[in-house]
Amino acid sequence: MRKPDLDAMPFEELWLLHEELTKILSDKIVAEKRELENRLAKLNRVEIIREPGSARPLSMTDRAPRRKYPKVLPKYSNPLAPSETWSGRGKRPRWLVAALETGHRLDEFKIDNVEGGAHKTRAARGRHT
C-alpha cells in the first residue's frame, strides 16, 4: 500500500479520511473492550469441580466465616457532644485529638461506668478457662 501524500490532499479529503479513521478506530476499540470484558468475566467466574480427595484452592465461598467479636463498649465521651464516644481502640477521634492538643488529659473524658463492666467480663473469662 502506497502512503498518501497528506500535505497535498485538499481539506475535504483529509476530513473524510479523518472521519473514516475515527469510525474504524471506535469500532476496533469497542471490539477490544468486549473481548477484555469477556476475558474478565471468565476470570471472575468461580467454577470449581469438586472431586473427592482432591486438593483444590480455596475460593471466596469456601473461606471460614469471620469470628464474631464481642461488642466493645465506649470508654471515652465528648462532654460537648455526649453522643460522640470512643472505645479506646483504633485511631483517636478528632474531638479527642483536638482536646488533648489544648492541654486536656485522656482521663478527663473517661466514662465512669465502663470500669466496672470491663472488670466483670475479665473476671468471668478467667473462670471459664
Image (cartoon, rainbow, N blue to C red):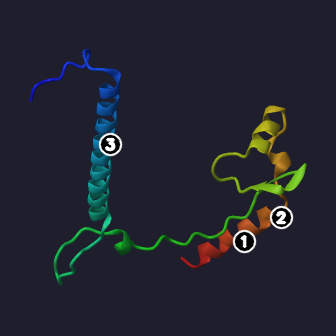
Look at the picture and state if 8 lies above or below 29.
above
Position above or below: 116 against 4: below
Residue drawn at the location 63% of the way across and 50% of the way down: 90
Lower sequence index among marks 3 and 1:
3
Give the number of the disc on residue 113.
2
Return the x and y of residue 7 as percentages of the image width and height.
26, 15
What label does residue 23 carry, if any?
3
Residue at x 65%, y 46% (from the top left corner):
91
Q: CA distance from mark 3 to mark 1?
A: 74 Å
| Observer-nearest of 80 and 1 | 1
- Spatial CA distance of label 2 from label 1 is 12 Å
The amino acid at mark 2 is: Asn
Q: Secondary structure at mark 3?
A: helix
Label whose residue precedes the other's in the sequence (2 or 1): 2
Amino acid type at circle 1 is Lys
Neighbor class of circle 2 (other Cα within 10 Å; few <14, some 14-19, many 20+) is few
User: Image quarter for residue 112?
Assistant: bottom right
Please tell me which residue is depicted at 78% across the width and 67% down the height of the picture: 116
117 on left or right of 71: right
Identify the residue position indicated by label 1 in the image. Answer: 120
